[in-house]
Image (cartoon, rainbow, N blue to C red):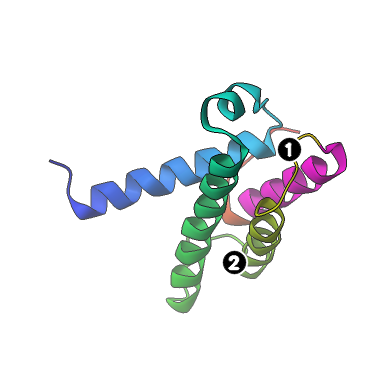
Amino acid sequence: MPSSSEEKAARTAAALNGLGHIAMGYSLEEVRRAKGDEKLRKEFHEDATIILDLVAHEAKRKSPAIRHPAECEAALSQFRDLVQSIDFDDVASMTDLKTYARHALEAFGVPLPE
């Protein structure tokens, strides 16, 4: 049975993966069909919240683990606000969501290809 810290690490990794999925512009069609848009919005919102909580915690500790915590928090907040009501078929909104995800991950310290 995994420990609490192992579960937290796994959930953090999954949340980063979820943001990465958006940041890289991967198709959401299959997951949208399987889960539905509302559940997907909720999961992406939860992903952003998990990472936002981690960034805030690390910033309070003055930890150098997060490259640019203020920028990361701002991008995650924008991502979280937009994803709550996003229409996944709206190209402009998805472009904004992708931009916020990329900025958040880059500020977090995750290198992304161009």
Classify mark 1: helix, strand or loop.
Answer: loop
Identified at 76% across, 33% down, the residue is: 114
Residue wearing tag 2: 69
Image location of residue 10, percent across then percent down: 34, 43
Identified at 68% across, 39% down, the residue is: 23
The crowd level at tag 1 (other Cα within 10 Å; few <14, some 14-19, many 20+) is: some
Q: Nearer the viewer, residue 5 or 31?
A: 31
Residue placed furthest toward the top = 30
Identified at 73% across, 43% down, the residue is: 98
Image location of residue 9, percent across then percent down: 33, 48
- Looking at the image, residue 5 sits to the left or right of residue 70; the answer is left
Q: Looking at the magenta stretch, what is its main secondary structure?
A: helix
Classify mark 2: helix, strand or loop.
Answer: helix
The crowd level at tag 2 (other Cα within 10 Å; few <14, some 14-19, many 20+) is: many
Q: Is residue 23 magenta?
A: no
Q: Quadrant of the N terminus?
A: top left
Q: Which residues are magenta?
A: 90-106
Which disc number belongs to residue 88? 1
Image location of residue 97, percent across then percent down: 74, 47
